[in-house]
């Protein structure tokens, strides 16, 4: 494992990568918390295909996430958080087959060895656990389990969450927070049965939370706060036991939020087919009425002689009406 790189020039980092390139047997590469910049080299996937941990967290890498990363079929931990990465999340992530259940038994696993009472409360917590791991997990007692994690948080990633990512049914932790992702949460998220922790907060995701998310029986942490989600929070599962702060900053309703769905939920679900729920007929009618009223009243307020004439006219009309009504009554 390589840590504590301190280079703050692109050239140095490229040179360092170049010497690493020859080491095809590398299992873990940790270049986190450095000042590395430039693009993530595409040969990372081609040459380091045995790698289980790739940690480039907290650098200044920019550009796209290269598709070649998907060739790292043994990768269990991909941590690219806190960089300057842009573009879409590659849909070929489904090829990270060490993160699928099918291949869990075929690859040597990394287990984490942590204090008994440590729960995986955050992905960054796991990585600090992983820092003192050494490759094969079989050598360890006190096994908490196979750890798989994707952390792409705090970048500038765009576009939708690729549907294909839901094929990673062996993935434990997924952090996509603090990006600019749009579109819905993929419907198939219910297939990712190993997920323990999902953080989608602070993106621009829209639509409803897919009810299949209730199928995730190991889910102990979910954060979808500060998106554009709407509708009911799926009920009848552990979702109600999460803190309300996991759901705030959306148009969601139902427990654990203190917002009733009976009124709210309906209007939200109808919104989809009726545009934005604004009745433009009433809006224009109201505007027309107010404008028309002021066209009549404003001159009267401004001009004294008109006011006189107007009230004189009213008196006259009133008089006529009275005589007319008394007339009509007497007749
Ligand atoms: C990163 O670069 C900045 C200036 O560009 C410097 O202040 C900082 O100490 C560097 N950090 C590391 C870990 O080298
Ligand atoms: C992903 O896997 C499929 C077949 O399993 C292959 O055709 C495709 O080229 C792979 N994509 C990448 C980017 O490695
Ligand atoms: C981040 O990337 C953009 C281009 O995508 C670039 O203009 C900007 O300077 C980069 N910011 C940092 C802090 O590297
Ligand atoms: C499992 O691993 C094998 C190689 O050992 C690979 O050919 C296969 O595509 C993988 N299966 C899945 C579902 O990723
Ligand atoms: C961990 O478990 C051992 C016994 O299995 C116990 O003695 C020890 O106090 C525990 N440590 C913590 C931090 O709970
Ligand atoms: C996800 O990443 C963000 C920023 O990188 C961090 O603040 C947050 O705690 C992470 N979420 C989890 C559940 O670890
Ligand atoms: C997942 O959830 C959906 C609806 O919530 C349900 O119809 C489906 O049977 C569930 N699938 C599994 C595998 O539990
Ligand atoms: C929510 O709905 C229930 C009845 O279903 C009602 O008793 C309660 O007052 C409502 N609460 C709010 C905040 O509207």
Image (cartoon, rainbow, N blue to C red):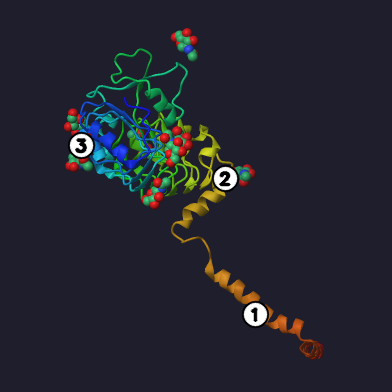
Q: Label 3, label 2: how many angstroms apart (C-alpha)?
A: 52 Å
Quarter of the image where one finds residue 30:
top left
Asked if 24 appears above or below 140 in the picture, the reply is: below
Q: Earlier in the sequence, mark 2 or mark 1?
A: 2
Q: Is mark 2 within 8 Å of ligand 8?
A: yes
Q: Which mark is residue 260?
A: 2
- Quadrant containing the C terminus in the rendered view: bottom right
Contact, CB < 8 Å: mark 3 with mark 2?
no
Q: Label 2, label 1: how many angstroms apart (C-alpha)?
A: 40 Å
x%, y% of residue 167?
29, 37
Residue picked out by circle 1: 292
Residue picked out by circle 3: 46
Q: Earlier in the sequence, mark 3 or mark 2?
A: 3
Q: Label 3, label 1: how many angstroms apart (C-alpha)?
A: 72 Å
Frontmost residue, 55 versus 305: 55
For image coordinates 24% across by 41% down, the residue present is 42
Asked if 295 appears above or below 177 in the picture, the reply is: below
Asked if 35 appears above or below 23 in the picture, the reply is: below
- Quadrant containing the N terminus in the rendered view: top left
Q: Residues within 10 Å of mark 3 (few under 14, many from 20)?
A: some
Q: Secondary structure at mark 2?
A: loop
């Amino acid at each position: 494992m390589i840590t504590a790189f301190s280079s703050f020039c692109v050239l140095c980092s490229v040179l360092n990568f170049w010497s690493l390139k020859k080491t095809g047997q590398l299992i873990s590469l940790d270049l986190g918390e450095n000042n590395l910049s430039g693009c993530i080299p595409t040969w990372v996937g081609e040459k380091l295909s045995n790698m289980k941990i790739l940690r480039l967290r907290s650098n200044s890498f920019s550009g796209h996430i290269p598709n070649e990363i998907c060739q790292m079929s043994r990768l269990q931990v991909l941590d690219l958080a806190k960089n300057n990465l842009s573009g879409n999340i590659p849909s070929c992530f489904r090829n990270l087959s060490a993160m699928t259940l099918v291949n869990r038994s075929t690859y040597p696993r990394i287990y984490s060895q942590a204090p008994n009472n440590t729960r995986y409360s955050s992905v960054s917590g796991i990585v600090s656990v992983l820092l003192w791991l050494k490759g094969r997990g079989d050598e360890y007692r006190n096994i908490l389990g196979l750890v798989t994690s994707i952390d792409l948080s705090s970048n500038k990633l765009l576009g939708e969450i690729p549907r294909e990512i839901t094929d990673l049914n062996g993935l434990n932790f997924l952090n996509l927070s603090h990006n600019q992702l749009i579109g819905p949460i993929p419907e198939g998220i219910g297939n990712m049965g190993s997920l323990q922790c999902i953080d989608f907060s602070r993106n621009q995701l829209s639509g409803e939370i897919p009810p299949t998310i209730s199928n995730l029986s190991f889910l102990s942490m979910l954060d979808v706060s500060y998106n554009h989600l709407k509708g009911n929070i799926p009920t009848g599962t552990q979702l109600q036991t999460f803190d309300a702060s996991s759901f705030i900053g959306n148009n969601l309703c139902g427990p654990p939020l203190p917002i009733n769905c009976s009124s709210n939920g309906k209007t939200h679900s109808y919104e989809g087919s009726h545009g934005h729920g604004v009745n433009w007929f009433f809006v224009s009618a109201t505007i027309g009425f107010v404008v028309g009223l002021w066209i009549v009243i404003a001159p009267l307020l401004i001009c004294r002689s008109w006011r006189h004439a107007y009230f004189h006219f009213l008196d006259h009309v009133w008089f006529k009406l009275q005589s007319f009504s008394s007339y009509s009554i007497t007749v």
